[in-house]
Image: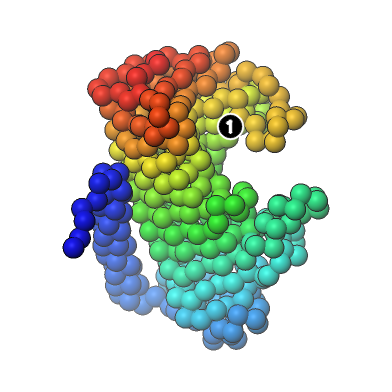
Amino acid sequence: MSVASSDPISDNLVVFSRMARCSVSRVVLLLLCCMHLSAAAAGAAVYNVESYDARPDGRTDASRALASAWSAACRSPEPATVYVPDGEFFVSHSAFAGPCSGGRMTVQIDGTLVAPSGYTGSASSGGEWIVFDHVDGLTVSGGTLDGRGESLWACKAAGHGGCPDGATSMKVLNSRDVVISGVKSVNSELYHVVIDGCEGVAVQDARIVAPGSSPNTDGIHVQSSSAVTITGASIQTGDDCISVGPGTSNLRVEHVSCGPGHGISIGSLGKESEEGGVENVTVSGAAFVGTENGLRIKTWGRAARSGAYVRGVVFEHALMRDVSNPIIIDQSYCPNDGGQGCPHQSSDVQISGVTYTDIQGSSASQVAVKFDCSASKPCSGLGLQDIKLTFDGGKPAEATCQHADGTASGVLMPPSCL
């Protein structure tokens, strides 16, 4: 006999996940069908990497074959596709550079790209394993990227020093009109996906997988970019599920699941001088399970006169389950263990116009809402509406505020400190 669930948050998460998968899958399927039809109608050329001697054995380096296929496709006077068929292709490093001649470039991956084992190639790769640069009109569709980051994580965990930073699995630089659809990234050495210096990017139905203990493995990092959307992503990793860096504007994140990980974070900002600000960001319909943070804004406690700011941010319709810091603004951020070497100054980053609406679930700590703002540039225009966060530690959940000003309305659990 079946027993009805007594956990409404679990029920909501299951329903949300199913709805997100279904809706995103339909959208992705429609987009791919349209892309294939358009390509066929335009007589798009297809360049199969096996025609350039790539071998799906997981051992023979396919980097040269990928480069040759890309070079031929990029020179094509018509839209072109670089095709990676089913199988395991070892890739030491690949750089795909534009601009290209024939319009839209598609990289269709049906197989798995495998990085070098160990981390000996991290330093020579320039910090990225697979990189696209100056490619306007780019689609990357399907496939798995296996970054094989385990050896580097072990080196960092040992604490002996001498470990390279690692390589980002996929980086898209200085490009416009980009679609990344249905890509799976596993066990990256460093960040999984980075979008930097881009405009008009859609990341759809991505799947990010790495252990919760893997260091600095942000799922999707966006910086110096505008008009970026991230929809339907499932992210399990050891750092921020999504991180938003300086110079980002008009970012929309919808129907993302996160956990394990450090949540969705704006920042860190304010570490360096002359940083760009972050504005017009919406995070809607995110679900967090067992994460360190939920919705976070973090700035360094440093009077760096960076010029950075955070403004015009909407967090709405989020579900939390056992999240240590469901809602947090931390303007004293410093990741150093024990606080050694931290500046312990008042942050120069101004935060304003940030609203939280319909945030529900459970907190793993008693302080479910924490606004720790700058003494020299207090947070202004914060808004709380319909917040329902509980704590199961035998005490009611709390909210704490420092140097924060704003309004609160609707049902408020815990009571507002604004």
Residue drawn at x 56%, y 47% as measured from the top left = 239
Residue 123 spot, x, y in % from top left: 75, 58
- Residue 279 or 69: which is nearer the viewer? 279
Residue 213 placement, left or right of 411: right
Residue drawn at x 54%, y 86% as measured from the top left = 51
Residue 364 spot, x, y in % from top left: 45, 37
Residue 310 in view, yes or no: no
Considering the image in quadrants, where does the C terminus appear?
Answer: top left
Chosen colour scheme: rainbow
Q: Quadrant of residue 54?
A: bottom right
Q: Quadrant of residue 415?
A: top left
Q: Secondary structure at mark 1?
A: strand
Q: Which residue type does callout 1 highlight?
A: Leu
Considering the image in quadrants, where does the N terminus appear?
Answer: bottom left
Residue 41 spot, x, y in % from top left: 30, 74
- Residue 138 or 299: which is nearer the viewer? 299
Q: Quadrant of residue 88?
A: bottom right
Residue drawn at x 31%, y 28% as measured from the top left = 387
Residue 346 spot, x, y in % from top left: 62, 18
- Residue 135 or 230: which is nearer the viewer? 230
Residue at the left extreme? 1
- The residue under label 1 is 269
Residue 84 in view, yes or no: yes
Residue drawn at x 32%, y 25% as measured from the top left = 413
- Residue 326 or 48: which is nearer the viewer? 326
Q: Residues within 10 Å of mark 1 (few under 14, many from 20)?
A: many
